[in-house]
Image: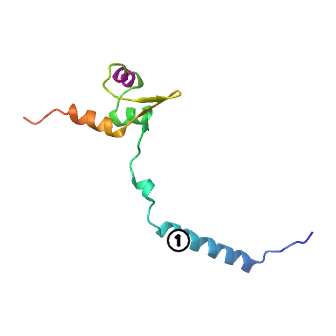
Amino acid sequence: MSVEIATKQDLQNFKTEILEQIKVLIAEPKSVQSETPKKWIKSHQVQRMLGISPGTLQNLRINGTIPYTKIGGVIFYSPDDINQLMQRNKRNSFK
């Protein structure tokens, strides 16, 4: 069994290499995936978007106001559908 000893210079070189790699990662443009909007969102995200309770969201699903997809026990919503719903129900508050 051979033992290798790391010197202070070895550790300094390692630190320098890591810092250079971090700089490269930070300088890279964000990936296309992180810039594209989410295709589907979950109930808690819709609740936050609309400022409504879980019960209100359930009522909107039941009466057909908000379209959704259920896979297993998880309910998903399209952000586009939510935005269209908001636009359809927009009221002119300026008189």
Q: Report the residue at 53% width, 28% height from top.
A: 72
Q: Main secondary structure of the magenta part?
A: helix
* Residue 80 position (above or below residue 2): above
Compared with residue 21, is residue 46 higher up or lower down, i.e. above or below? above
Say which of 66 and 2 sits in front.
Answer: 66
Quick one: which residue is furthest to the left in this view?
Answer: 95
The residue depicted at 32 percent of the width and 35 percent of the height is: 82
Quadrant containing the C terminus in the rendered view: top left
Horizontal placement of 62 versus 5: left or right? left
Q: Which residues are magenta?
A: 56-61
State the image coordinates of residue 57 (x, y, percent, origin top left).
Answer: 37, 25
Where's residue 20, x and y in %? 57, 74
Residue 60 is a magenta residue:
yes
Instruction: From the top left corner, tell me how far across and down residue 91 is, in percent.
Output: 16, 32
**Residue 32, quarter of picture:** bottom left
Q: What is the x, y in percent for residue 15? A: 65, 73
Residue 44 quadrant? top left
Residue appearing at x 10%, y 36% in the figure:
94
Residue under label 1: 23
Q: Quadrant of the N terminus?
A: bottom right
Q: From the viewer's perspective, tell me whether residue 54 is left or right of residue 24.
A: left
- Between 5 and 33, the residue placed more toward the observer is 33
Does the segment drawn in magenta span residue 5? no
Mark 1 neighbour class, 10 Å CA radius: few under 14, some 14 to 19, many 20 or more: few
Furthest-bottom residue in view? 9
What SS does tag 1 mark? Answer: helix
Q: As displayed, is residue 64 above or below residue 92? A: above
Q: Nearer the viewer, residue 71 or 90?
A: 71
At horizontal 83% and vertical 74% (from top left) the residue drawn is 5
**What kind of residue is marked 1?**
Lys
